[in-house]
Amino acid sequence: MEKTFIPQGYAPCLNLYDTQKAIGLLKRLFEDNLCGALHLRRVSAPLFVEASTGLNDDLNGVERPVSFDIPAAGRDAQVVHSLAKWKRMALYRYQFSVGEGLYTDMNAIRRDELPDNLHSVYVDQWDWEKVIAPRDRNLDYLKDTVRAIVGCVCRTQETLRSVFPQLTALPVVEEAVSFVTAQELEDRWPDLTAKEREDAWVKDHHTTFLIGIGGALKSGKPHDGRAPDYDDWTMNGDLLLWNSVLGRAFELSSMGIRVSPESLDRQLTLAGCDSRRALPFHKLLLEGKLPLTIGGGIGQSRLSMFLLGKAHIGEVQASVWDDETIQACQNAGVILL
């Protein structure tokens, strides 16, 4: 697929003004549904964190954070990539109990992102995290949480369709979730790339949770990169939906059971990141002082794009685009915000 792909004959379901109204309604609906389903409370979150804390998300380990100094504080700061580790620290500081969780609006800048239909250097998502008991660190608990989130998506879509009848032309999100592991996909299609495997599976299983992101498969390669210090690579995954507008698998959320002291110790070594053991967050975790948690991020622009039937993420968020993307969208009559 080209960097910017606008399907032949594409026309948005909603005009520009209705799109803005629908985005606002969608976000309110989904937040309410998510809070009720997962027992979450909203908290305020940082746009940047102190570089020396180790709280920023390293993503695949090669992305450069936007960094700057704060002379008045005598500190160096980084704009967050996500809040994967900050949330767990917040649960510890706020003294949340088992079964309680938080969510927040996360706004990030990922300067090294390669923009296309689904990616922008500006990232907005609902970051959520929940305290769990030791008995909950298993795939069954993860799967139940995935099903709850998919239910929130379905209820949000149902209300949106009643308010904006134009959206009834789009397929209904399938609430039944297909669970498959990254290793099962590699075994079935060893000659395909990771993304091609996702497309091949999700085309027939429209709501899929792909388990096992970050660890090496039998081929010696991971399905996709995942930092070693938040998800347990054996109990995490991506929520994928079939995007009928683009004709491809569409990642809506990344989530998982978080690392325990034992799995963090193992994954830091496997990833060659042992130097992180001395950082404040990692020391607390390795000493068993942080709560056991489950958490993830759900793309706000991604969900808006999917439920409103948009072909490009720039139709639901304002960002900065390269000339090629701007020209391709202009040629197709696609309005970038």
Image (cartoon, grey):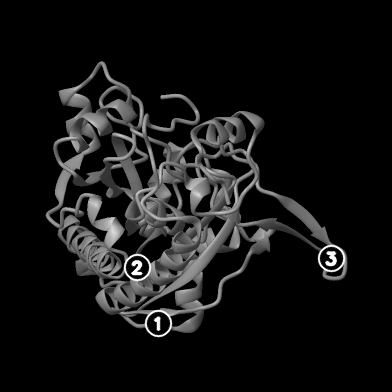
Residue at image point 72% right, 59% down: 77
Mark toward the start of the polypeptide (1 vs 3): 3
The numbered disc on residue 292 is: 2
Residue 38 on image: x %, y %? 28, 74
Tell me the amino acid under the disc marked 2: Leu
Location of residue 120 by image quarter: top right
Residue at image point 20% right, 54% down: 173
Location of residue 219 by image quarter: top left
Q: Nearer the viewer, residue 18 or 191?
A: 18
For mark 1, what is the residue? 96
**Distance in Å between CA atoms under marks 1 and 2:** 11 Å
Residue 235 on image: x %, y %? 26, 51
- Examine the rendered structure and indicate whether residue 181 appears above or below residue 109: above
Residue at image point 40% right, 55% down: 14
**Distance in Å between CA atoms under marks 1 and 3:** 31 Å
Q: Is residue 233 left or right of residue 185?
A: right
For mark 3, what is the residue? 74
The secondary structure type at the circle numbered 1 is loop
- Examine the rendered structure and indicate whether residue 317 appears above or below residue 31: above
- Residue 191, visible in the rendered structure: yes
Residue 76 on image: x %, y %? 77, 58
- Examine the rendered structure and indicate whether residue 34 appears above or below residue 249: below
Q: Is residue 324 left or right of residue 42?
A: right
Query: Pointer 2: residues within 10 angstroms few (<14), some, or many (20+)?
Result: many
Tell me the amino acid under the disc marked 3: Gly
Cβ–Cβ under 8 Å for marks 1 and 3: no
Mark toward the start of the polypeptide (2 vs 3): 3
Q: Residue furthest top?
A: 191
Q: Is residue 190 left or right of residue 216?
A: left
